[in-house]
């Protein structure tokens, strides 16, 4: 198994899911937060972008928490637009994608640091998959809540499990 290509697929899945959810929202809806202690989709996107840049720039040679990162500022979006956030999102996902394109499975045993703590590359990538899955779920949940009956599902629609199962079984039916 090629673990590196598996990481490419997993990160791509979460990125795509978040983007499909965001595409269903208006600019105003992207900045909606359901409560004072809640984050908007815009805030989550800004935070994920900052995290991507910090973790994956100079991945092998510098700590994953860069000294110039101002994490707290990632939770303030008054000066941002959906366009500026999308540009940052794309630019910072590209850092990870370029790293993964160059990575070999043998690199997964190397040591990298995040906030001074040693991780194997494999563990650092798994840590980030979990982090991005968490935030992607938040983005999807917020978008689904905001769109409500106008939501276009990103997975199996309600009351569609049986049909989906039959379709998958037919698709993957073993050859006789």
Image (tube, rainbow, N blue to C red):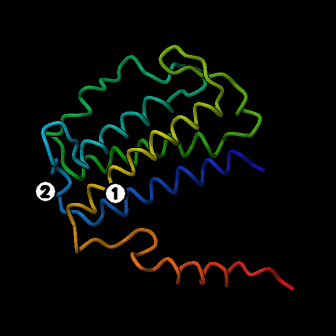
Residue 117, percent across and down? 55, 16
On screen, 77 above or below 157? Answer: above
Residue 95, percent across and down? 49, 40
* Contact? badges 1 and 2 (CB < 8 Å): no
Residue depicted at 23% across the width and 28% down the height: 73
Q: Who is closer to the viewer here, 151 or 74?
A: 151
| Front: mark 1 or 2 | 1
At mark 1, the secondary structure is helix
Which residue is disc 2 drawn over?
A: 28
Q: Who is closer to the viewer here, 167 or 21?
A: 167
Image quadrant assignment for residue 106: top right
Q: Residue furthest top?
A: 116
Q: Is residue 17 left or right of residue 174?
A: left
At mark 2, the secondary structure is helix
Residue depicted at 75% across the width and 49% down the height: 2
Counting labels gives 2
First in sequence: mark 1 or mark 2?
2
Q: On the rendered image, what quadrant is the C terminus found in?
A: bottom right
The residues bearing labels 1 and 2 have C-alpha atoms spaced at a distance of 16 Å
Residue 121, percent across and down? 64, 30
Q: Residue furthest right?
A: 176
Which residue is disc 1 drawn over?
A: 140
Residue depicted at 43% across the width and 29% down the height: 54
Q: Is residue 53 left or right of residue 74?
A: right
Q: Is residue 31 left or right of residue 105?
A: left
Residue 52, percent across and down? 44, 37
On screen, 158 above or below 19? Answer: below
């Amino acid at each position: 198994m090629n673990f590196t290509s598996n990481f490419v697929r997993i990160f791509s899945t979460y990125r795509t899911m978040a983007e499909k959810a965001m595409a269903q929202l208006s600019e105003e809806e992207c900045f909606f937060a359901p409560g004072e202690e809640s984050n908007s989709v815009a805030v989550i996107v800004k935070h994920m972008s900052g995290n991507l840049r910090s973790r994956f720039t100079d991945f092998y040679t510098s700590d994953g928490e860069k000294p110039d990162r101002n994490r707290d500022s990632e939770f303030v979006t008054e000066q941002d637009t959906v366009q500026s956030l999308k540009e940052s999102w794309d630019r910072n996902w590209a850092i990870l994608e370029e790293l993964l394109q160059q990575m070999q499975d043998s690199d997964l045993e190397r040591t990298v640091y995040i906030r001074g703590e040693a991780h194997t590359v494999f563990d650092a990538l798994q840590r980030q998959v979990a982090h991005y899955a968490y935030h992607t779920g938040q983005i999807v949940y917020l978008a689904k809540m905001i769109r409500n009956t106008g939501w276009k599902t990103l997975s199996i629609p309600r009351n569609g499990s049986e049909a989906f199962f039959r379709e998958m079984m037919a698709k993957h039916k073993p050859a006789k």
